[in-house]
């Protein structure tokens, strides 16, 4: 097997970032699409249940898929006036909104599965049954699937007492990958989108040195990592990455954390194509069934030279990042494009009313306009 060595970026400053990726000569892993359903239990546990087998979804390109992924995540925001009234002690805090489970479900059923590429996470559910061990305890289960509230753990104990076989069955399903806790899926969606945004920065700078000091690249890295309001004063950066002054900075330790986090996640997401260097046919088939959106996006971005550029939606209430197939595209979705057109039309009407009620053709603003 001849590996492709894909050097994403070389940097020569003290804060340099040298990333080298060795991909096996595996063909592109298309995301596997399996029918997905939402599972909700009374102690606050949510999961996605998948059918056992699925088929490759070759319908979408990686830029469309990345844009759809980004639409699941609302940008970090300030508290609204109503929220501040209810929680005055949170003044100065920022909010990261929860992801909407029904939107996640729609995304998965349209584009393909997510949440199965990280094998290590599922391995913790593979406990042998012995005379002394009956698998995971309720507390262990809860902590692994992200149920951490004490009252919810109490409810979980009551639930599993009422349904004694459920804990073992659920543990097995999670290990096989026919059930994925929503907490894992949410984490993967957020982290995958970060990785995609960081890869976009690195790809663009492929042959040049990359300065992690004050630079548009650092700014983009800050944006990609949801650190914007903490480092770049909110409202000062409209998201177009035009270099401003030097009021923002990212401490060295944070930079290192960001880079480490990025490496860990890329490795996690590529596990179905990188974990086993020796393959049997059965193993290859099983690994393929674990490929999802995460493997597809990361592998596509690392292995192809196709243009991949981030843009920002021009609709003021949206401002989400999206990925362009053509450079003239202004909005992240058809919905936003329509909304923006309607807004522009209304704006023009207002102008014509102001000008003495005469019907006017909108003219492009000149220097004196
Ligand atoms: Zn938009």
Image (spheres, helix red, strand yellow):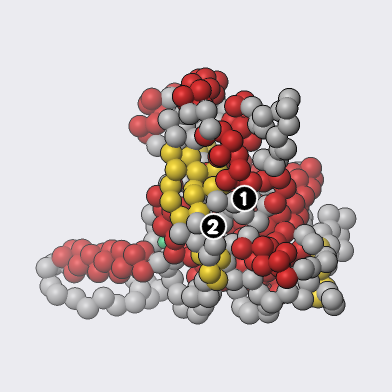
Which residue is more in the foreground, 135 or 153?
135
The residue under the point 49% across, 49% down is 49
Up-down relation of residue 159 to residue 73 (above or below): above
The residue under the point 55% across, 51% down is 178
Residue topped by disc 2: 52
CB under 8 Å between discs 2 and 1: yes
The location of residue 144, given as percent across then percent down, is 63, 35
Q: CA distance from mark 2 to mark 1?
A: 8 Å
On the rendered structure, is 233 left or right of 27?
left
On the rendered structure, is 44 left or right of 175?
left
Helix, strand or loop for disc 2: loop
Quadrant where the N terminus lies? Answer: bottom right
Residue topped by disc 1: 176
The location of residue 34, given as percent across then percent down, is 50, 61
Residue farthest along the front direction in this orientation: 131
Quadrant where the C terminus lies? Answer: bottom left
- Quadrant holding ligand 1? bottom left
On the rendered structure, is 272 left or right of 150?
right
The residue under the point 37% across, 76% down is 366
Q: Earlier in the sequence, mark 2 or mark 1?
A: 2
The residue under the point 83% across, 65% down is 277
The location of residue 281, given as percent across then percent down, is 73, 70
Could you tell me how many numbered marks the image carries? 2
Which residue is more in the foreground, 340 or 46?
46
Residue farthest along the left direction in this orientation: 357
Q: Residue 285 appears in which quarter of the rendering? A: bottom right
Up-down relation of residue 224 to residue 81 (above or below): below
Helix, strand or loop for disc 1: helix
Rate crowding at label 1 as few (under 14), some (14 to 19) or many (20 or more) other CA atoms within 10 Å.
some
The location of residue 123, given as percent across then percent down, is 71, 45
């Amino acid at each position: 097997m001849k590996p492709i060595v894909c050097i994403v970026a070389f940097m020569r400053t003290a804060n340099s970032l040298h990333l080298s990726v060795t991909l096996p000569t595996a063909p592109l892993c298309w995301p596997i699409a399996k029918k997905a359903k939402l599972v909700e239990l009374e102690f606050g546990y949510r999961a996605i249940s998948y059918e056992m087998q699925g088929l490759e979804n070759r319908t979408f390109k990686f830029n469309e898929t990345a844009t759809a992924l980004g639409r699941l995540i609302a940008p970090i925001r300030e508290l609204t006036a109503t929220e501040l009234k209810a929680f005055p002690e949170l003044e100065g805090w920022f909010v990261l909104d929860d992801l909407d489970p029904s939107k996640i479900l729609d995304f998965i059923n349209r584009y393909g599965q997510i949440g199965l590429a990280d094998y290590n996470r599922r391995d913790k559910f593979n406990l042998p049954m012995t005379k002394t061990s009956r698998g995971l305890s309720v507390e262990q289960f809860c902590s692994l699937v992200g149920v951490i509230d004490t009252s919810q753990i109490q409810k979980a104990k009551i639930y599993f007492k009422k349904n004694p076989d459920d804990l073992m069955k659920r543990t097995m399903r999670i290990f096989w990958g026919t059930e994925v806790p929503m907490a894992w899926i949410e984490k993967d969606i957020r982290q995958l989108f970060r990785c995609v945004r960081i890869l976009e920065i690195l790809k663009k700078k492929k042959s040049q040195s990359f300065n992690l000091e004050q630079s548009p690249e650092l700014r983009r890295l800050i944006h990609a990592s949801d650190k914007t309001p903490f480092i770049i004063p909110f409202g000062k950066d409209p998201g177009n990455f035009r270099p401003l002054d030097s009021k923002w900075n990212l401490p060295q330790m944070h930079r290192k954390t960001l880079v480490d986090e990025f490496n860990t996640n890329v490795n996690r997401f590529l596990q179905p194509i990188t974990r086993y260097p020796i393959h049997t046919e059965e193993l290859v088939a099983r690994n393929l069934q674990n490929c999802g959106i995460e493997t597809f996006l990361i592998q596509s971005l690392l292995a192809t030279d196709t243009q991949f550029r981030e843009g920002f939606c021009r609709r003021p209430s949206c401002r989400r990042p999206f990925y362009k197939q053509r450079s003239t595209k202004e909005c992240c979705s058809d919905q936003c494009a329509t909304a923006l057109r309607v807004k522009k039309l209304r704006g023009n009407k207002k102008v014509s009313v102001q000008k003495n009620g005469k019907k006017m053709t909108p003219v492009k603003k000149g220097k004196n306009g």
